[in-house]
Amino acid sequence: MLVAGIDVGSRATKAVVLDGERNLRACSVLRTRPPFPELARQALDEALSRGGLRGISPDYVATTGFGRYNVPFRDLQVTEITSAARGASFLYPSTRYVLDIGFQSTRAMKLGEGGRVREFHTNDKCAAGAGGFIERAARYLEVGLEKVGELSLRADNPQTISSVCAVLAESEIINHVSEGKTVENILRGAHLSLATRALALLRRVGLDGETTFVGGVVYQAGMVRSLEETLKVKLNVPAQPELVGALGAALLALQRLEKQGAIPKSPVEPAT
Amino acid sequence: MATAVDNIAARYQEALLDPSLPLVQAWKERHPGARAVGVFPVYSPVEIVHAAGMLPVGLLGAGNQLEIAYADARFQSFICSIIKSTTEMALTGRLKVFDGLVFQGICDAARNLASVMARNLPGMRVEYLHLSQNQASPAAEDYLVGEYRRFQSAMEELSGRRVTEDGLRQSIAAYNRVRALVRVLNGLRARSPELVSALECYLLARLGATLPPEGSAPVLESALVAAQGRQARPKDRVRVVVQGSFCEVPPVELISALEEAGCYILDDDLLLGWRCYEADLPTEGDPLRSLARAYLNSVRFSSVRHGLDQPRATDLVAQAKQLRADAVIYLAAKFCEPALLDYALFRQALEQAGIPHLFLEFEEKMWLVDKPRNTIETFVESLLFD
């Protein structure tokens, strides 16, 4: 018995394969590019291949992410909010809040029992409120995205970026560069700016319990530090944060199979 | 496969949503010399307009069909869409099809819109109806009868035709028929939402608010028969009540998105003023008094009618329970003060009753509904994957 969760995100497409006991059997991450049906199939095939499961078709496929409807072989699609909540709750059963910062949007969720979403808010359609903003800043500063997190950690005088619009925020970055501010301090300013917006979202759902931070931006250590300083809490940070949505989708796939009686219900244990 | 009810609703959709009001234009062309009166939400006694030989037409904004070019220059940014789009329609000549306009004191913006129209549309008869605010007062009925009498005189003056008691009773009967058909259609939706969608109900009710009752009733009857004969299997969806859209109407794309995201909308308050009576109004006795009594005693709860007897939040909870709704979606127009102020009361009551709810804001000029759709889907999933 195998199920798959595929998260077709705006920057990366992720696939997770679980067995009937909720063990992680395989995963993959590909850069998102059209056409999505082929991309999703490729992500799944790559995961299966890496897990030594080549040629095996999962019994159920659940998709999530903005491209979730463009996967013809799916059995079910769920929003990225539902899937991130389920994935985070599985990894950290006592988490009450989830912050998911993706490339295109940021979501704050309050969870109920079993990872059920009780309340949630997403950022408005504004590029300054999500991971894409950091990527654009890095591009302007001619820094590879993989180096952004470490550089940001080295900041000694973070520069304020106060604009709520990505275009204006980039103008602020240009000003900082022309004034001779260091790349480290500008990047940390960008992280703090994003953290402030995330705090506003989290405050709308409440912020009085264990909080898990997921999404590809988690890989940027400076972002985690900025968030923890801004939120004044210690965050749960998964080892593979970009896979949490796909994991949640796979878990929901299992739940559907259990509900349909295709497999017996098994107690939920955190994945290893 | 498209069924008759799809065809009926779809046949009129484009014309109903066209801010040039082609259905009203066509009616006037077919009735040379006849007059039409635009009626701003939420409620007005349209029977009086009809009895004066004129066509009362719901003035329901321009949806996302009209670029706002002039109205933005005349209003502050924090004002609801329907005020701006109605003004835009006026300033671009789209309201010339009307001979009169009627407003009531539902909110500050609507109250002032009456004056804006009077100033900007010379020659247009603009009436402001003072519906009673205190429904519980023993004097309310006599007051409202007096106000309706004043309104009747104004309509007589506009049309040049005297309103007789018999004529008004006939108009009440004609609108009773339309309201009853809309009521039965909505009852069918509440019982078997797989047979008729919220969008279809809205379009058909809007037809009743646009055509004369003699013209809309046969169409509604056909649609009802078609819906009753529809073959559809109930889907695994969340049953919801939609509240908060009693004045400005959400874009049809958003209504569709609510349904496509996995909701059966058992009931809503769209076009509330045109379907606010749960039973027929009496067609005997003093017709003005019948209209006044109905407004004071029988009208459905809303955020613009302040009953002192029972909080409207209690009514919403009772409605949700009676319809066995899984949840309530509070769908309020941006900057709609009555709806947004009431949300605090509704939220508290729903939470106390253990009824899940989702709050969403909309505006007329929403072309992309991806974000609200995503939000609704997540809400639906939170209930489905319980």
Image (cartoon, rainbow, N blue to C red):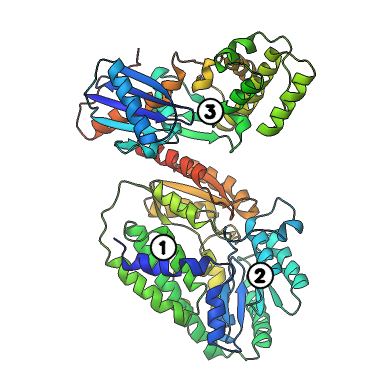
* Circles 2 and 3 on the same chain: no
Q: Secondary structure at mark 2?
A: strand
Which residue is rendered at x = 39% and y = 54% of the image?
Answer: B322
Q: CA distance from mark 2 to mark 3?
A: 47 Å
Q: Is residue B314 left or right of residue B124?
A: left
Q: Are marks 2 and 1 in contact (CB under 8 Å)?
A: no
Q: Quadrant of the C terminus of chain B?
A: top left
| Residue beneath disc 2 | B103
Subunit under mark 3: A
Q: Are marks 2 and 3 in contact (CB under 8 Å)?
A: no
| Residue beneath disc 1 | B200
Mark 3 vs mark 1: in front: 3
Q: Which mark is residue A103?
A: 3
Q: Secondary structure at mark 3?
A: loop
Of residues B193 and B43, which is closer to you in this image? B193
Subunit under mark 2: B
Q: CA distance from mark 2 to mark 1?
A: 27 Å
Of residues A255 and B257, which is closer to you in this image? B257
Mark 2 vs mark 1: in front: 1
Mark 2 or mark 1, which has the lower sequence index?
Answer: 2
Q: Quadrant of residue B295?
A: bottom right
Which residue is rendered at x = 41% and y = 67% of the image?
Answer: B9
Q: Quadrant of residue A162?
A: top right
Mark 2 vs mark 3: in front: 3
Mark 1 burial class by Cα count in 10 Å: few <14, some 14-19, many 20+:
many
For residue B121, say whether it is visible. Answer: yes
In this rendering, is residue B250 above or below A40? below
In this rendering, is residue A256 above or below B371? above
Q: Position of residue A191 (x, y in %)?
A: 63, 20
Q: Which mark is residue B177?
A: none
